[in-house]
Amino acid sequence: KRAPLVALELLDVVTSEKGEHLPVDANFFQHVISALCQSKQLGHVDAAHDILVSMRFDEDGENFSIATTACCNDVVKGYCSTGTGTGTASNAQAVLVSLVSKFRRNEIAGMPDRHGF
């Protein structure tokens, strides 16, 4: 239950002046996404989705997305667990379609697999 709150605290530190010299890599953000998706709060899952689709790193001179299949699955499952009813299902479906579309346009590196669907 505390994982999403700890993840948000870590993000605050890393993005503040105190954390500008901390070494942060793709694994850090993948763990933050996973932690945020454990929450039942839509705001936490929205934050995970924003990180998933926007965070990119330079590796050996090449820009790459941190969006792995596992992260995509976590985000879709996170949206599914934020409530009940057709609104929640529609929201999760929209995110699923969006992630698949971004993958097809080579905007992200991974897409949800059968677990996300």
Image (cartoon, rainbow, N blue to C red):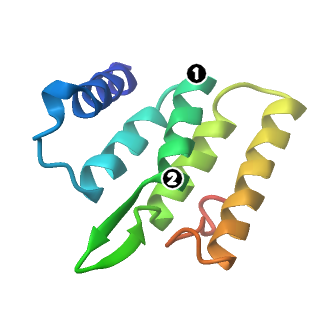
Q: Is residue 11 left or right of residue 108?
A: left
**Residue 46 position within the rendered picture, expressed as x and y whole percent measured from the top left:** 59, 34
Within 10 angstroms of label 1, few (less than 14), some, or many (20 or more) residues?
some
- At 58% from the left and 24% from the top, the residue drawn is 43
Question: Would you identify the image quadrant in which residue 59 lies?
Answer: bottom left
For marks 1 and 2, give the one nearer the viewer. Answer: 2
Q: Judge by depth and name the residue closer to the eye, 19 or 102.
A: 19
Question: Would you identify the image quadrant in which residue 98 lies?
Answer: bottom right
For residue 54, the mark is: 2
**Residue 40 in view of the camera:** no
**Residue 38 position within the rendered picture, expressed as x and y whole percent measured from the top left:** 46, 33
For residue 103, the mark is: none
Name the residue that disc number 1 marks: 41
Q: Amino acid at mark 1?
A: Gln
- At 23% from the left and 34% from the top, the residue drawn is 14
Q: Amino acid at mark 2?
A: Ser
The quadrant in which the N terminus is found is top left
- At 29% from the left and 58% from the top, the residue drawn is 26
- SS state under label 1: loop
- SS state under label 2: helix
Q: Judge by depth and name the residue closer to the eye, 115 or 43.
A: 43
Q: Is residue 28 left or right of residue 102?
A: left
**Residue 33 position within the rendered picture, expressed as x and y whole percent measured from the top left:** 42, 43
Q: Residue furthest right?
A: 86
Question: Would you identify the image quadrant in which residue 36 lies?
Answer: top left
**Residue 53 position within the rendered picture, expressed as x and y whole percent measured from the top left:** 55, 54
Q: Is residue 116 left or right of residue 28?
A: right
Q: From this view, report whether residue 106 is shown above or below residue 20.
A: below
Q: Which callout, 1 or 2, points at the residue further toward the start of the chain?
A: 1
